[in-house]
Amino acid sequence: MNAGLIGTGKYVPPHILTNADLEKRMDTSDEWIRTMTGIEERHIADDSIDTSDMAYHAAVDAIADAGITPDEIGLILVATVTPDQPFPSVATMIQEKLGAKKAAAMDVSAACAGFMYGIVTAKQFIESQTYDYVLVVGVEKLSKITNWEDRNTAVLFGDGAGAVVIGKVSEGRGILSFELGADGSGGKHLYQEEKLVMNGREVFKFAVRQMGESAVSVIEKAGLTLDEVDYLIPHQANIRIMNSSRERLGLPLEKMSKTIHKYGNTSSASIPISLVDDLANGKVNDDDVIVLVGFGGGLTWGALCIKW
Ligand code: ACO
């Protein structure tokens, strides 16, 4: 018996902020942002939509897609660095709203790798047969910690949520292998003081190296070779970082998920949001071997190899 992703859902707030809108607010250009990051627009939540609201909407869709009811969920894990407030956790907020009365609930803090940490934690509880279903949500309202005076970071981020239900799948399917890691010595490169602070160049170098290494590592751990991989879903942080991990795997452009142009970097939400879009567009199909790989503040990283 293996743990697998049996339901998916996403939510992005309706308001779209384009590069042209940013040109009016700061000294930047559509051309610079597109070339240097791959971003064209991002969704931004207004004051009426907090992190828990986005998490709730994505969770409702994932639960319906899994064909279960909220009271069958044993655990709710919400990966976020932008909770509504330090406590109670976003996980407990949506537990109540969903009516998931039998679920334990907690938030996971691993920045952009948080969704990977959540999935791997969920997998342990499924495979030990502790719970039948675990809900994992990646959600961020990064706009509330974005320094809108800092053009180096303000153009990068967006808001949104993605959710999955983890449950049992048959042997040989689901999560075949994983890798998680952290290097606290790099914490100084990406952190929140009041607003988000980033040393873009250092994060860039780390990400290029780590994304490639982690992707290769999970493929080997799954007993597969690079040419058996059908699709890559990297954390959508920067198109140049994404392409370098794709090239490491020798995958053509069309076998890599790319949603960064529409959503920007939504941190822990970027991989599940991409997965939902890729399933809808027929880019991820039954029996595909897919690799998910993320990195983020901490520094942290995580990767999964999944047979869909
Ligand atoms: N518009 C126009 N010019 C800009 C902008 C902007 N928005 N931002 C920076 N520049 C300028 C800089 O001032 C600099 O000008 P200078 O040469 O005159 O000093 C020039 O562009 C180059 O800037 P660099 O920072 O050196 O460019 P770099 O190639 O490093 O790209 C970027 C910057 C896109 C931020 C890149 O470093 C990057 O993507 N880093 C990783 C970011 C990332 O993945 N973050 C994940 C964090 S997610 C999380 O944990 C929440």
Image (spheres, grey):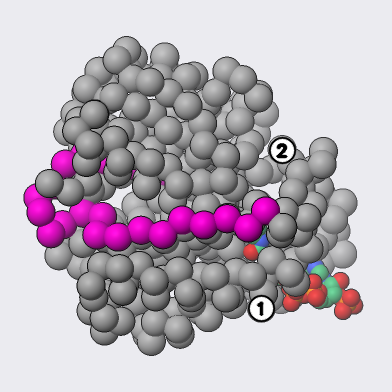
- On screen, residue 181 versus residue 278, left or right, reads right
Magenta stretch bounds = 162-184
Mark 2 close to ligand 1, CB under 8 Å? no
Q: State which image quarter holds ligand 1.
A: bottom right
Give the residue furthest to the left.
Answer: 170
Q: Nearer the viewer, residue 235 or 214?
A: 214
Taking the spot 20% from the left edge, 67% from the top edge, the residue there is 288
- On screen, residue 3 versus residue 199, left or right, reads left
Q: Which residue is mark 2?
A: 144
- Residue 188 location, quadrant: bottom right
Query: Which comes sooner in the sequence, label 2 or label 1?
Result: 1
Taking the spot 9% from the left edge, 50% from the top edge, the residue there is 170
Helix, strand or loop at mark 1: helix
Q: Alpha carbon of mark 2 to alpha carbon of mark 1: how far?
A: 26 Å
- The image position of residue 282, as x and y in percent, is 24, 64
Instruction: Verify CB contact (< 8 Å) between mark 2 and mark 1.
Output: no
Q: Is residue 123 magenta?
A: no
Taking the spot 43% from the left edge, 28% from the top edge, the residue there is 56
Q: Which residue is mark 1?
A: 35
- Residue 31 location, quadrant: bottom right
Helix, strand or loop at mark 2: helix
- Amino acid tagged 2: Lys
- The image position of residue 87, as x and y in percent, is 61, 20
- Tell me the chief SS of the magenta region: strand
Q: Is residue 165 magenta?
A: yes
